């Protein structure tokens, strides 16, 4: 039986992380541990983690680094190297999982599989309704209905509300998942073996966008990893925040160096070449 580690990337968002950690207490798949990969949030985050660990029903490991700009990939690599698990699920700290989230990744995982999910983009009003108390109740199981209601015209549009519907019928899921599969950095899973084969995350990306998902997807594709959808199975609700401005330098690096050379093994990853 494979061991599973959930790696949560975070920067500053203490409230959102608290809601996420509470949601994990209600997961139907219980055999997992958590690594919080913190890109230098500081003392407030450290105090919060110290307090939360004492009441958690799962094991938490906290890894952090100096706040020296956007270095998400560097802290993700650090999280990978400090884990003894053989399978990783990646989730951002502002994405709140459905109770069957880990179960969906676990039951569909395989040695050569990369599982890719999606997310519901909540508006600010719905995001503000989420709390540590709400996400451990049955009411949260139907939270997608609130999002779906908003998306069809009841004030304040919710993007991708349909991604919150849990569908277990394989035929229906096969039909809706025919589109090409792409990694979303806040909801995917992969074996440690595959991740080490491509040398983890490329730390040359020092801004948001592409580096933690599109780059990884491209390099895993070069080693013939099998991408599989867990859309409408591994459901997460993404809490509102202003739109992130992605880094142009990331695009230039990805297209001019990575795709041009078609190299799956990055030189500035877990191992420095």
Image (cartoon, grey):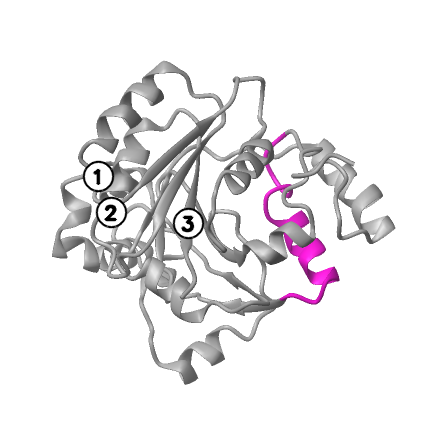
Query: Which residue appears at 57% of the width and 71% of the height?
Result: 179
Which mark sits nearer the N-terminus, 3 or 1? 3
Q: Nearer the viewer, residue 59 or 168?
A: 59
Distance CA(mark 3)–CA(mark 1): 15 Å
Number of the label disc, if any, that sits on residue 23: 2
147 to 13, vertically: above or below: below
Question: x%, y% of residue 151?
Answer: 33, 56
Number of the label disc, if any, that sits on residue 56: 1
Instruction: Report the magenta residues as a range.
Output: 207-225
Q: Quadrant of the C terminus?
A: top right
263 to 44, vertically: above or below: below
Q: Quadrant of the N terminus?
A: bottom left
Question: x%, y% of residue 24?
Answer: 27, 48
- State left or right for residue 192 relative to residue 144: right
Quadrant in the picture for residue 181: bottom right
Which mark sits nearer the N-terminus, 1 or 2? 2
- State left or right for residue 169 relative to residue 135: right
Decide: marks 1, 2 in contact (CB < 8 A)?
no
Residue occupied by mark 3: 5
Q: Nearer the viewer, mark 3 or mark 2?
A: 3
Q: Residues within 10 Å of mark 2 (few under 14, many from 20)?
A: many
């Amino acid at each position: 039986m494979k061991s599973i580690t959930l790696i949560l990337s975070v920067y500053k968002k203490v409230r959102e992380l608290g809601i996420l950690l509470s949601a994990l207490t209600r997961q139907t798949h219980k055999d997992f541990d958590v690594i919080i990969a913190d890109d230098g949030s500081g003392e407030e985050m450290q105090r919060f983690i110290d307090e939360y660990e004492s009441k958690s029903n799962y094991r938490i490991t906290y890894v952090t680094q100096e706040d020296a700009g956007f270095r998400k990939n560097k802290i993700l690599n650090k999280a990978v190297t400090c884990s003894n698990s053989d399978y990783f699920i990646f989730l951002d700290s502002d994405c709140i999982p459905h109770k069957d989230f880990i179960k969906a990744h676990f039951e569909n995982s395989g040695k050569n599989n990369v599982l890719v999910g999606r997310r519901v983009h909540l508006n600010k009003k719905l995001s503000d309704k989420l709390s540590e108390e709400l996400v451990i109740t049955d009411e949260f199981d139907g939270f997608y209905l609130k999002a779906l209601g908003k998306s069809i015209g009841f004030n304040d549009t919710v993007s991708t509300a349909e991604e919150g519907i849990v569908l277990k019928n394989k035929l229906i899921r096969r039909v809706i998942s025919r589109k090409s599969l792409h990694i979303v950095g806040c909801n995917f899973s992969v074996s440690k073996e595959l991740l080490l084969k491509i040398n983890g995350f490329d730390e040359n990306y020092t801004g948001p966008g592409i580096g933690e998902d599109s780059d990884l997807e491209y390099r895993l594709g070069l080693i013939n990893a099998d991408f599989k959808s867990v859309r409408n199975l591994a459901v997460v609700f993404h809490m509102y925040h202003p739109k992130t401005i992605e880094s142009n330098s990331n695009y230039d690096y990805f297209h001019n160096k990575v795709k041009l050379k078609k190299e799956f093994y990055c030189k500035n990853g877990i191992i420095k070449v």
